[in-house]
Image (cartoon, grey):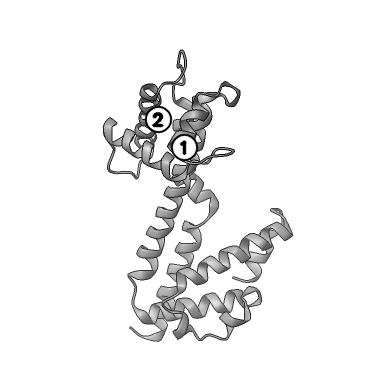
Amino acid sequence: MTNSEAKKNALKLIDEIIELFNEETIRNFIDEPIEKALNIFNFDLKGLVTYRTFIHYTGSFVKGLYEHIPWCLQKPSKDQACAEAMHLLEADYQSSQFRGYDAAFLDARNPSLNGLEFVLVQLSEIIKTRLRMKYARWVYVSRIECVDWHTRCSMAEILIARWKLFLPPDILMCSPVQLADHIPDLIDILGSADNMVSEMLGADTAWIFHETYK
């Protein structure tokens, strides 16, 4: 591949990555289907939550959630959804004082927290976070890891040129060749810089920055 071809391909890939990491794109792809599943889920539970009903409802919620995500090709069975709900709550649920599945169960039995609905909202946020991480990994694999070394060098060169005013000095001291295998890390740094710029400028003026440093 010639240098011009590598640069052309690098520009195309960078534009695709920027579009794929656009917050509106991610919300449409991940957040909105999850929120829709949450809004239509039936919370009509009579009586105190038991372990049996807790497993049933959290599993039913996870199963229904994945059915609302079009790009999830593998839809879990009820048993698989119950197992995943238990795993996610044990790994990531955080109450005001405790962590894990038992903390989630206690919160579901707490009427002052709106019980089961409160836990399912937290579970939906856990799943959002995990799917966003999987999504980011897919973007990196499909747009960076699968391309040749010369294209990755061109991508690093373009990213440095566009954002040099907001990159730390130790990164600017590196050559594109040194950064060719670290483009996801470079994009993460630029993403943090982008967030800071947006906060400083405000939503109404942040687009000026992006147009200026394209």
Q: Which residue in the structure is indicated by mark 2? A: 58
Q: Nearer the viewer, residue 178 or 95?
A: 95
Tell me the SS state at disc 2.
helix
Give the residue at x 40% y 74%: 9
Is mark 2 in CB contact (under 8 Å) with mark 1?
Answer: yes
Tell me the SS state at disc 1.
helix
Quadrant placement of the C terminus: bottom right
Tell me if residue 5 can be seen.
Answer: no
In the image, residue 186 sits, relative to residue 139, either above or below, namely: below
Q: Which residue in the structure is indicated by mark 1? A: 123
The answer to which image quadrant residue 160 occupies is bottom right
* Rendering coords of residue 143 (x, y %): 39, 66
* Rendering coords of residue 84 (x, y %): 34, 39
> Callout 1: few (<14), some (14-19), or many (20+) C-alpha neighbours within 10 Å?
many
Q: Nearer the viewer, residue 100 or 16?
A: 100
Q: Amino acid at mark 1?
A: Leu
Q: Nearer the viewer, residue 18 or 184?
A: 184
Give the residue at x 39% y 69%: 144
